[in-house]
Amino acid sequence: MGDTTKIDERDVLANPWIDNVTRVSAPYKRANRLFHPADSVIDCGGVKIGGKEKIAVMAGPCSIEGEEQALRIAQGVKAGGATLFRGGAYKPRTSPYSFQGLRPRASWTWSRPARPPVPIVSELMSEDRIPEFEEYVDVVQIGARNMQNFQLLKAVGKMHKPVLLKRGLCNTI
């Protein structure tokens, strides 16, 4: 990693445990086409994102405030051409006295047959909500403030669902 121009490959290959050397000095190894030439295509509840697929658009309310509101907006989202419905059941707020979403009561909004007509994206804020998100949510959003909550990120990594990671200020991926 970093500037590899000053390293003599022969010195590294002299080690009997080294099989080959690949210089890696380009940034963004996980996204750089030099290291990952194939398209990445993610299935988000039936909507494909990436590769040659059409651009996916996500829309919806910041916070789900009720079943009727959520379904009406989800239908409008779909009618307007968006492919994913983003609605928050758990909302981090600056003040603990502000409305923080419907919390567990929002799961009825996501349950079948009242489920919105497009895949659902919602922000997960704590590990204890994972079973609910496994059942009802198609894409798990991790907000900027939880981007460094490594315990939560490890747990989300075991969910086998796509993750929308909002990058925090000064964070790298």
Image (tube, helix red, strand yellow):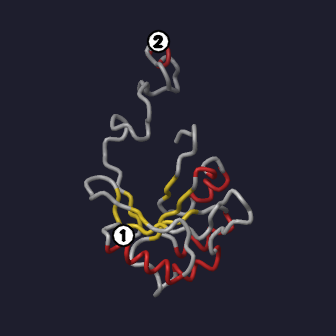
Residue 29, above or below 142: above
Front residue of 84/27: it is 84
- Structural crowding at the residue carrying mark 1, measured as other residues with C-alpha within 10 Å and reported as few (<14), some (14–19) or many (≥20): few
Q: Which mark is residue 71?
A: none
The secondary element bearing badge 2 is classed as: loop
Residue 158 horizontal/vertical position (percent): 57, 60
Residue 26, above or below 5: below
Indicate the quadrant where residue 157 lies.
bottom right
Looking at this view, name the residue that lies furthest to the right.
96
Residue in the image at 49% along x and 23% along y: 2
Front residue of 20/68: it is 68
Front residue of 72/114: it is 72
Residue 167 horizontal/vertical position (percent): 53, 46
Q: Name the residue carrying label 2.
A: 6
Residue 48, above or below 106: above
Instruction: Name the kind of residue labelled 2 in the image.
Output: Lys
Q: Is residue 15 visible?
A: yes
Q: Name the residue carrying label 1.
A: 46
